């Protein structure tokens, strides 16, 4: 199912700019974690050569004499070293679910694209090493920043196999997530089955997981009544169904249970989770839940 949003280059460009502009107002929660990686500006797990004092230790042969605490030597006659906090460059793995349910509604599709560009721009602005992946069911692909920022990523969307299969959750084992990275999954989480495989993949090998979950009124606040032809977006199969008040009530109850399960399981795995409405401006949508839960912070 092709989205009008994905087919319009002018719209994609506008959404890219809006998402990048939000990185001036909000940032990723990178400062609440001890990182390992290349040289950068965030606190690392080891000792380094930054200006942030961490501790003292005894002098050992081969130590840099510039870090000797000469005042302590004058008092005690013993060489001690000043230890400074290592500064590192964090790693961000941005995983974009590009399955059909993300694009079935143009308002929701626009929010997905804005969130992709917000997350990537916020990572780059923080000095992080960014890897961006497109995942469709069991198929995944690493794309470069140039493809993302020039909107050529659309032609790189992997196709789910087989095309007429039941909805399949993103299989994060199909991509090479980096150890100890901040892993951001952008997905509507509209899949049957347990969230556990996804959440385990986000948190394994000392990774830290975040989920940005776009949704729209066309799925969350429906008020159907009468005869409808439903289209399953992943397989594009059609179903004729009469909707009455009892069926509509069951739908809303199941929808609420589904996301309550996700929120419960994300707490168990230490993954931060925030739903992001498609209808408000992106700034307002992020303030509603993502900022309140710490998934994003004010810059």
Image (cartoon, helix red, strand yellow):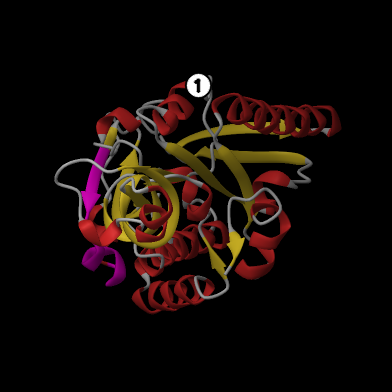
Dot 1 lies on which element? helix
Q: Judge whether 109 appears above or below 94 on screen.
A: below
Q: Is residue 34 left or right of residue 139?
A: right
Q: Judge whether 22 appears above or below 130 on screen.
A: below
Q: Position of residue 138 (x, y in %)?
A: 30, 30
Q: Is residue 156 left or right of residue 83?
A: left
Q: Position of residue 121 (x, y in %)?
A: 40, 67
Q: Residue at x 25, y 62 (%)?
A: 66
Depth check, front residue: 52 or 193: 52
Q: Residue at x 57, y 70 (%)?
A: 299
Q: Which residues are magenta?
A: 140-151
Q: Judge whether 133 appears above or below 209 on screen.
A: below
Q: Can residue 78 be seen here?
A: yes
Q: Can residue 94 be seen here?
A: no
Q: Residue at x 75, y 47 (%)?
A: 221
**Quarter of the figure with residue 119:** bottom left
Q: Position of residue 33 (x, y in %)?
A: 48, 45
Asked if the stretch drawn in magenta spans residue 145, the answer is: yes
Q: Position of residue 68 (x, y in %)?
A: 30, 56
Asked if the stretch drawn in magenta spans residue 108, the answer is: no
Q: Is residue 79 left or right of residue 287?
A: left
Residue where numbered disc 1 is placed:
196
Q: Residue at x 49, y 70 (%)?
A: 23
């Amino acid at each position: 199912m092709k989205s009008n949003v994905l087919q319009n280059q002018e719209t994609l460009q506008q959404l890219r700019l809006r998402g990048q502009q939000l990185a001036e107002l909000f940032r990723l929660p990178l400062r609440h974690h001890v990182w390992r990686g290349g040289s950068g500006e965030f606190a690392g797990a080891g000792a380094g050569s930054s200006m942030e004092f961490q501790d003292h230790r005894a002098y050992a042969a081969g130590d840099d004499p510039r870090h000797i605490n000469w005042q302590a030597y004058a008092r005690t006659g013993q060489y001690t070293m000043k230890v400074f906090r290592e500064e590192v460059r964090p790693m961000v793995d941005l995983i974009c679910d590009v399955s059909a349910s993300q694009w079935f509604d143009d308002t929701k599709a626009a929010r997905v694209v804005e969130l992709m560009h917000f997350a990537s721009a916020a990572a780059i602005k923080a000095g992080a090493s960014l890897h961006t992946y497109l995942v469709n069911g069991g198929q995944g692909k690493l794309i470069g920043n140039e493809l993302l920022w020039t909107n050529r990523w659309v032609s790189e969307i992997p196709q789910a196999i087989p095309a007429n299969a039941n909805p399949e959750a993103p299989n994060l084992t199909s991509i090479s997530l980096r150890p100890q990275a901040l892993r951001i999954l952008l997905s509507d989480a509209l899949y049957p089955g347990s969230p556990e495989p996804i959440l385990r993949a986000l948190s394994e090998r000392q990774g830290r997981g975040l989920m940005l979950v776009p949704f729209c009124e066309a799925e969350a606040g429906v008020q159907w009544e009468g005869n409808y032809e439903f289209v399953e977006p992943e397989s594009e199969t059609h179903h004729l169904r009469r909707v009455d008040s009892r069926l509509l009530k069951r739908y809303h109850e199941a929808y609420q249970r589904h996301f309550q399960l996700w929120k419960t399981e994300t707490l168990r795995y230490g993954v931060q989770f925030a739903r992001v409405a498609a209808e408000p401006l992106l700034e307002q949508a992020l303030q509603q839940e993502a900022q309140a839960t710490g998934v994003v912070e004010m810059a």
